[in-house]
Image (cartoon, rainbow, N blue to C red):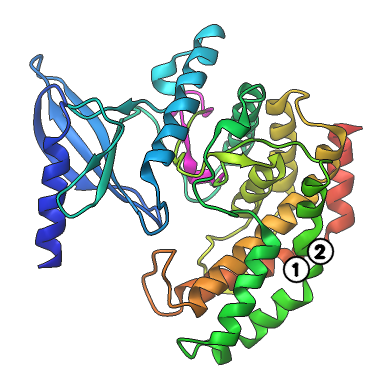
Amino acid sequence: MKNSLNYAARNQALAAYDFGGEITDAIRFGSGHINETFNVSVLRDNNETKRFILQKINTNVFKNPGQVMDNIIGVTEYLKEKIKQRGGDPSRETLSVLRTKKGESFFKDSAGGCWRCYEYVEDTFSLDKVEVPDHFYQAAKSFGAFLYMLKDYDASSLYETIPRFHDTPHRYRSLRRAVIADKFDRVESAIDEIAFAARHKKDCSRLFDLQKAGELPCRVTHNDTKLNNILFDPQTGAGICIVDLDTIMPGLALFDYGDAVRFGASTALEDEPDLDKVHFDLNLYELYTKGYLEGTDGALTPLECECLPWGAKIMTLECGIRFLTDYLQGDTYFRTHYDDHNLVRARTQFKLVAEMEEHWEEMYEILHKYIG
């Protein structure tokens, strides 16, 4: 029954859009943890096929999809103008939202599910793991350029689509509440991970305190800068389009930089169960740092630059805490495929934090090669 209801809701969503032709296929697509995604193929009158991305927004995570879409449309329309000004192709270099037949930014089905649609960016590829080091460098330049192009955008005009998303002290407090409640009797299986988080409690407030003091500027941030949120051009190898814009919000540049390093400078996927395969790669860290600073093109303040290693460490720590909290709370946020999936994810993140600490001086030596 559940599958038939999902199928019916998807068909309602498909009918809400004018795709300009006959729908020939709508198949599940991607590997995201949060939203349900479909690749829609449409046959046009000229016998050419055009594709679209149809997504069911996870309203358990994004409580107000209208605000999410307002953020996305505001930022992508702004980016289109910036891309035109520099002679780029806005249809490939940022996402294009397809409005419903009624002109709305998303569609609500009869069961209350919320759906949105993008034009598919053809002739691109994405990566779940760094395969060629240059891809990571190109991704860094793309995320850096994303920040640069939005440096004059009024971050205060954006909705906070997930309140306190990168409030790391709040994330730690949520973990402690989950430990005390132990609603799913999982604390005993995560004793070592809980202890690791507790030893790093003071680190959680470092960037947050600087932000509260006004020493780090508020910027438009992506907040999910994993490698697989970059579309690459197969001809040039350059990152050309940033996707998954649900968490566009006001924040710190260090959040975006740090999350990208967390994900991309690891030698393994974030759910690798064999921790012997999980290491922090200093060479990839250097590539990303170089590319990000090139992409931001002087937009970062001196203190932002000096805090970049802290961004990497704290975003990795925070992500591990989030995975661990979700595990203790019964896996309500991240999509899982087996019982201990979130615990495995937490372990990989904490392993990376530990290795960053081992190489802390080297991380700063690398940074100072590029900021003087």
Which of 197 and 368 lies nearest the eye of the viewer? 197
Could you tell me which residue is drawn at 63 percent across and 50 percent down?
259
Quadrant of the rendered structure where residue 91 is?
A: top left
- The amino acid sitting under disc 2 is Glu
Residue carrying label 1: 354
Viewer can see residue 287: yes
- The amino acid sitting under disc 1 is Ala
Q: Which residues are magenta?
A: 225-239
Q: Position of residue 241 (x, y in %)?
A: 47, 29
SS at mark 2 in the image: helix
Magenta run includes residue 73: no
176 w.r.t. 298: above or below: below
Could you tell me which residue is drawn at 68 percent across and 27 percent down?
295
Quadrant of the rendered structure where residue 176 is?
A: bottom right
Q: Position of residue 362 (x, y in %)?
A: 87, 52
> How far is the residue under mark 2 from the one under mark 1?
5 Å
> Badge 2 local density, few (<14 within 10 Å), some, or many (20+)?
few
Do the CB atoms of the residues marked 2 and 1 lie less than 8 Å apart?
yes
